[in-house]
Amino acid sequence: MADRTAVYPGTFDPITLGHLDIIQRGSRLVDRLVIGVTTNPSKEPMFTVAERLAMVQREIAGMANVKVVEFDSLLMDFAEREGAAMILRGLRAVADFEYEYQMAGMNQQLNDRIETVFLMADASLQPIASRLVKEIARYGGCIAPFVTPAVAADVGAKLPAR
Ligand code: ADP
């Protein structure tokens, strides 16, 4: 059987311990995991694509079958280009479900050969969201429980000195 590839798309603004847990779990299920960092300007990210790419690259340095690339196209076209059999997504609370359900449904209509597979992070990491990490940091809160020390430093460097 051909090598099994999954793509894990997201904004990763910034990459959190929740993302990293999904990446570790996903990498054990497939031969090759390709993380796709979306440009997604509509989300007005804190970090540029190049910065987000570099942060993910640094965090996955020890993982042999994981790589990261940038993409700015339809997810299904990106997955097809990578030869992926599946799209990996993380599911947190019920709040994620409706959006993920709708996206998986529409992607299935665009390309029925690629499955969307959902994983759950470790229970302690499930509440983590990049959006809240940034919000906590902006108000001077400690983000150490949610991101690696290197990412915490990167977020700190983006904020005006308090
Ligand atoms: P997007 O902008 O596509 O939502 P994100 O970078 O926010 O991208 O997240 C990428 C994927 O990782 C999504 O499937 C999201 O649900 C999942 N994810 C993010 N944080 C967690 C977490 N703490 N636990 C499980 N899945 C998560």
Image (cartoon, helix red, strand yellow):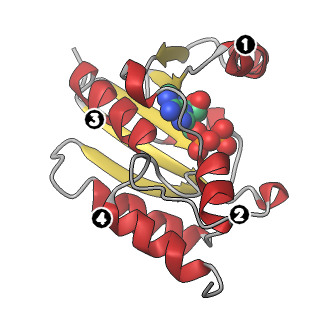
CA separation in Å, label 4 and label 2: 19 Å
Which residue is the site of mark 1? 101
CA separation in Å, label 3 and label 4: 18 Å
Q: Are marks 1 and 4 in contact (CB under 8 Å)?
A: no
Q: Specify the amino acid type for callout 2.
A: Pro
- The image shows residue 154, relative to residue 94, as above or below, that is below
Q: Specify the amino acid type for callout 3.
A: Arg
Which residue is the site of mark 2? 45
Q: Nearer the viewer, mark 3 or mark 1?
A: 1
CA separation in Å, label 2 and label 1: 24 Å
Residue 32, label in figure: 3
- Residue at (63%, 58%) from the top-left corner? 134
Please state which of residues 119 and 155 is positioned toward the viewer in this rendering. Answer: 155
Q: Quadrant of the N terminus?
A: top left
Element marked by disc 3: strand
CA separation in Å, label 3 and label 1: 25 Å
Q: Quadrant of the C terminus?
A: bottom right
- The image shows residue 9, relative to residue 107, as above or below, that is below
Specify the quarter for ligand 1. Answer: top right
